[in-house]
Image (cartoon, grey):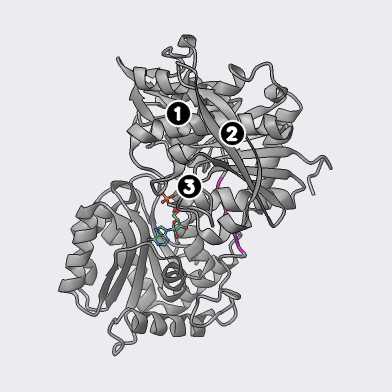
Amino acid sequence: MAETGTACKVAFVGSECYPFVKTGGLGDVMYALPRALTREGCEVRVILPMYACIPEKFKKEMKYIGSFMMDLTLEGRTFYVGIMELEMDGVTYNFIDNREFFDWGNPYTGLWEDIPKYCYFSKASLAILNYLEWIPDVIHCHDWQAALVPLYLKTKFWNSDLATSRTVLTIHNLRFQGICSIAHLKYWSGLSDGLFDYSVLIQGDDEANMFKGGLAYADRITTVSETYAREIQTPDFGERLDGHLRYHQGKLSGIVNGIDTDIWNSETDKLLAVPYTREDVLQKKWENKCALRQKLDLNQEDGSKIMIGLISRLTDQKGLDLIDYIFPKIMEDGRTQVIVLGTGDKRYENAFRYYEGVYKGDVCAYISYNESLAHQIYAGTDAFLVPSLFEPCGLTQLIAMRYGTVPIVRETGGLKDTVAPYNPETGEGNGFTFVMYRPADLLDAIDRAKEVFFGDRPGWDGIVQRDMEKDVSWEQSAKQYLALYEELKKGN
Ligand code: ADP
């Protein structure tokens, strides 16, 4: 329960949430954090678009709650807002139904359509709270898709019951900001001219930026690790908003993500060939590794090879150009197998497919999105690569550690905050790290990992044990969010 004994009422507003719709880490956070907050005594409602791609089995469970018409755009055009509801494990999910906006796409379709879609979504999220007469202490908004919520709240809804609610805006990834022409945003948002100012929605000569406006108007800004909170205030990571964030630094803080330790639990994970615990990980991981090799048609004959996994959106952010550059060198020793699971830029999809052909039987490029295979890779591989150019928090290294798979990461953002470098002198640390974004530095980290894997097995097994013991749950972070909500509730 919350330390103060007072539960907070919190509305989460975001564009994706596992298990309904997920394209990346945001979907995981929107699922796991509300559940963790519920365990801390909060009452949480999650507001999402009713995308057509939500699986039928969930749609069938939803209840129709009501509907109304809402005005949007400069002309005050009216749009249907339907409210669907589903309850799961103590969290209430409200889906905003409007076929014009959400009946196509998966869920993003390109900025030109996404801007109207998320203007509508942000305004409708507030409108449904009023309709439901459910007035939260805090409205917690996520990423640019929900960034207009603080602006609508303080303008269009200033004299409604919701006016007492405070807002938190969390940056999961600053690269995506919802930028378009001023005319496009003015038209669709219907927000007043006064907000189209350089300190709020305008950037450069002729652009409007939804995230920028939200950051200016939110009561608090959080991001998903302390290091990323510092990094985004510098030109290298600030994505042109570093000055804006430095200006608002008084209300900016970093709270690291966790993972849902019920979903990611090697002891109970039904998707694994063999479940395992910290006690029998060394033997059972081997069995999972053999099963994975069999499933993916990888060579079995040489049992001593190190198996390295990568599960990722295949985009520039993830440091894949570094991997591409050194791939032959990674494979040179003939003692390495690599499994890649991901989709994204054709450039990387093709590069990994090419290496699969060159290193037949030792490389698998599984170009797809596949939840079950992801579980099996986390369990069956020995090491896990996350060499990102930038990484706000990163969940894959947390899941890997939880499954006793040693991460090899670049020291940036949440990767720096969650993976302590292995120190052979003291035998401490969780993985292998490098600092500079250079292929040779990544190769050096991989080689250091191999040195320990092949040359100091007790040292390696010690890392595996420590990683499985590490607390990567939401519990500590949920307490920090709760403390922030309580502060806001008190009016600080
Ligand atoms: P990001 O949000 O930048 O994509 P994160 O590391 O925060 O990266 O979260 C990625 C999440 O998506 C993890 O849960 C990871 O397991 C999952 N994931 C990414 N790509 C795939 C894929 N191709 N198949 C299955 N799961 C994937």
Instruction: Look at the image and tell me whether residue 155 can be seen.
Output: yes
Task: Decide which of tag 3 and tag 2 comes sooner along the chain.
Answer: 3
- Which amino acid does the dot numbered 1 rest on? Phe
**What's the magenta region?**
256-261
Name the residue rendered at 37%, 44% in the picture. 390
Q: Residue furthest right?
A: 5
Label 3 to label 2: alpha-carbon separation: 15 Å
Q: Residues within 10 Å of mark 1 (few under 14, many from 20)?
A: many
Task: Decide which of tag 1 and tag 3 comes sooner along the chain.
Answer: 3
Task: Decide which of tag 1 and tag 2 comes sooner along the chain.
Answer: 2
How far from the left and from the top, in percent, is residue 296?
32, 78
Q: How many marks?
A: 3
Name the residue rendered at 41%, 19% in the picture. 187
Task: Look at the image and say whether residue 467 sits in the magenta stretch.
Answer: no
Label of residue 211 in the image: 1
Label 1 SS: helix
The residue that disc 2 covers is: 125
Label 1 to label 2: alpha-carbon separation: 17 Å
Q: Is residue 146 left or right of residue 330?
A: right
- Which amino acid does the dot numbered 3 rest on? Tyr
Label 2 SS: helix
Contact check, label 1 and label 3, Cβ < 8 Å: no
Label 3 SS: loop
The residue that disc 3 covers is: 51
How far from the left and from the top, in percent, is residue 429?
49, 61
How far from the left and from the top, in percent, is residue 489?
74, 29
Give 403 or 119, whichever is nearer the viewer.
Answer: 119
Label 1 to label 3: alpha-carbon separation: 22 Å
Look at the numbered disc 1 and say if its residue's Cβ is closer than 8 Å to ligand 1: no
